[in-house]
Image (tube, grey):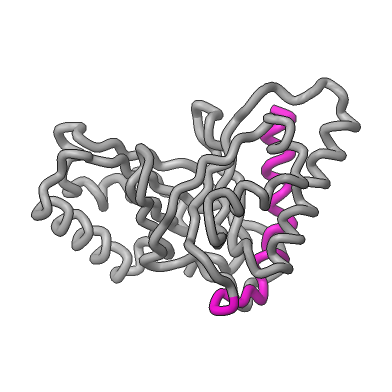
Amino acid sequence: MRRRQLLIASALALPLLQAQAAETGSTGEWYFIFLETGKPTPDDKAAVQKMQQGHLDNFVRLHAEGKLFAAGPMRDPARVKRGIVVAKAPSREALQRYFDPDEYVREGYMTVNAAVARPNKALITLAVNPGGIEEARIVLIGRDEKATPAAQVQRRALLQQQVDSGRFGAWYSLATGPVAEVLFAKTTDGDALQAALAAYPGLADKTVSLDVWGQWLGKGVLN
């Protein structure tokens, strides 16, 4: 519970990170990162608070250097995935070095699960309201390694239609890993989001998975 509270509290700083991001000035590939649970944090509350501050300070540094564009904690019922980061880096090795100053990651309390990503519609990182955070929903669609080209085209068309309709405010396609597509919606109505994606090929027969979880982002990051 304490770690969950710390993660949610960390989002209070994230709108400041997301404001005034100069995306065109950054170089390298886009990476979508899941920060995941590692070993248990110490019982020392002061030590954990110090780590939390260092965690946020590192985000501030990365943003100032034009490397980080969005971040926020999530509510994974299994408590495996704890938050997301969207960043650019010239290589996977360079990306991992971004987190060297972060004791959470350096000491194994969190792990970095990163995939090269295509931002079909990126989270907004300009003119963000720095007044606080808001709860949204993150939608994770599983990968189907056996999908035919026709099925892939159909799936992308359905997602594009949903984005164009305004139901989803951001959409990333991940190149590797069990998650193929990540979408963000401002609503907190998870049932409505699942219903909107019911026609997605592979969901009915459970060829692909669909998860809808709570996500916290800075105000203005989603339309």
Position of the N terminus by quadrant: top right
How many marks the image carries: the answer is: 0
Question: Which residue is at 35% across, 62% downward?
Answer: 167
Left or right: 127 as drawn, with respect to 175: right
In this view, the residue in front, 185 or 48, is 48
User: In the rendering, at what x and y percent does residue 207 appear?
Assistant: 19, 34
The quadrant in which residue 146 appears is: top left
Reply above or below: 115 against 51.
Answer: below
Question: Which residue is at 56% across, 74% downward?
Answer: 23
User: In the rendering, at what x and y percent does residue 214 appear?
Assistant: 51, 44
Camera sees residue 175: yes
User: In the rendering, at what x and y percent does residue 64 appear?
Assistant: 73, 68
Question: Which residue is at 56% across, 60% downward?
Answer: 89
Q: Is residue 142 magenta?
A: no
User: Secondary structure of the magenta portion, mostly?
Assistant: helix
Question: Which residue is at 58% across, 72% downward?
Answer: 26
Camera sees residue 216: no
User: In the rendering, at what x and y percent does residue 141 appear?
Assistant: 32, 44
Q: Is residue 8 magenta?
A: yes
In this view, the residue in front, 190 or 115, is 115
Left or right: 81 as drawn, with respect to 57: left
Segment tinted magenta in the rendering: 1-25
Q: Residue furthest right?
A: 46
